[in-house]
Amino acid sequence: MVKAAKNYVCERCKKETPFMEVCDYCSRKICRSCEKAAATHSKTDHTIICRSCWGDLRKRRRFKSR
């Protein structure tokens, strides 16, 4: 018997998705389509920014400066 994957609800667009990420700037759980950019700064440091935070220039500048 195959176990069904649990679907989560995106806090930004309210779409159901099996995979969620947490925005590092607003702490909302977002789906892949709401994710604007992701950067890996080292092997352990992975930063994600959502489309809403990308519109805020302070948060975008902080993301790009890392």
Image: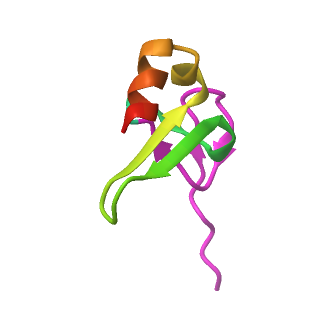
* In the foreground, 36 or 19: 36
In this view, which residue lies farthest toward the bottom? Answer: 1
In this view, which residue lies farthest toward the left? Answer: 44
Q: Is residue 24 above or below residue 8?
A: above
Q: Residue at x 44, y 36 (%)?
A: 23
The quarter in which the C terminus is drawn is top left
Number of residue marks: 0
Task: Characterize the magenta stretch by its predominant secondary structure.
Answer: loop
Q: Residue at x 56, y 58 (%)?
A: 6
Q: Residue at x 51, y 22 (%)?
A: 53
Q: Could you tell me residue 60's position as x and y percent?
A: 48, 24
* In the foreground, 60 or 21: 60
Q: Is residue 16 above or below residue 54?
A: below
Q: Could you tell me residue 40's position as x and y percent?
A: 43, 55
Q: Is residue 4 magenta?
A: yes
| Res 33 quadrant in image | top right
Q: Is residue 43 visible?
A: yes
Relative to 59, is 55 on the left or the right?
Answer: right
Q: Is residue 8 above or below residue 53?
A: below
* In the foreground, 64 or 46: 64
Q: How is the image coloured?
A: rainbow
Region in magenta: 1-23
Q: Could you tell me residue 51's position as x and y percent?
A: 61, 27
| Res 63 quadrant in image | top left
The quarter in which the N terminus is drawn is bottom right
Q: Could you tell me residue 39's position as x and y percent?
A: 48, 49
Relative to 35, is 60 on the left or the right?
Answer: left
Q: Is residue 53 above or below residue 38?
A: above
